Image (cartoon, rainbow, N blue to C red):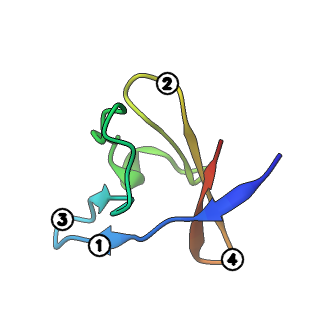
């Protein structure tokens, strides 16, 4: 299990977007961060998982 840092953009509404180096074949639509009290985010297609560790977000691939 490896983690790669994500570049996070925090919008006024708390949305999480990125990564800026993104994978164009993947949908970048991500659920709202405040929908996940356990700080785990998923891509809409369920292929990737985001974990919040010590206030940083990482991409679990």
- Between the residue at mark 4 and the residue at mark 3, the CA separation in whole angstroms equals 21 Å
**Number of numbered callouts drawn:** 4
At horizontal 53% and vertical 27% (from top left) the residue drawn is: 47
Pointer 4 and pointer 1: residues touching (CB < 8 Å)?
no
- According to the picture, the residue beneath numbered tag 3 turns out to be 13
At horizontal 42% and vertical 71% (from top left) the residue drawn is: 7
At horizontal 30% and vertical 42% (from top left) the residue drawn is: 28
Which of 14 and 45 lies nearest the eye of the viewer?
Answer: 45
Residue 29 x/y as whole percent: 27, 39
Q: Upstream in the sequence, badge 4 or badge 3?
A: 3
- Between the residue at mark 1 and the residue at mark 3, the CA separation in whole angstroms equals 8 Å
Q: Residues within 10 Å of mark 4 (few under 14, many from 20)?
A: few
Q: Upstream in the sequence, badge 4 or badge 1?
A: 1
Q: Which mark is residue 10?
A: 1
Q: Upstream in the sequence, badge 2 or badge 4?
A: 2
Give SS at disc 1.
strand
- Between the residue at mark 1 and the residue at mark 2, the CA separation in whole angstroms equals 22 Å
Q: Upstream in the sequence, badge 1 or badge 2?
A: 1
Q: Which mark is residue 46?
A: 2
* Residue 47 horizontal side relative to residue 2, left or right: left
Residue 5 x/y as whole percent: 58, 68
Residue lying furthest bottom in this view? 55
Q: Which mark is residue 54?
A: 4
Give SS at disc 2.
loop
């Amino acid at each position: 299990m490896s983690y790669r840092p994500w570049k996070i953009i925090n919008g006024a509404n708390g949305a999480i977007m990125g990564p800026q180096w993104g994978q164009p074949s993947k949908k970048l639509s991500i659920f709202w961060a405040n929908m996940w009290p356990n700080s785990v985010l998923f891509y809409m297609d369920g292929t990737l998982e985001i974990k919040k560790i010590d206030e940083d977000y990482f991409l679990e691939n």
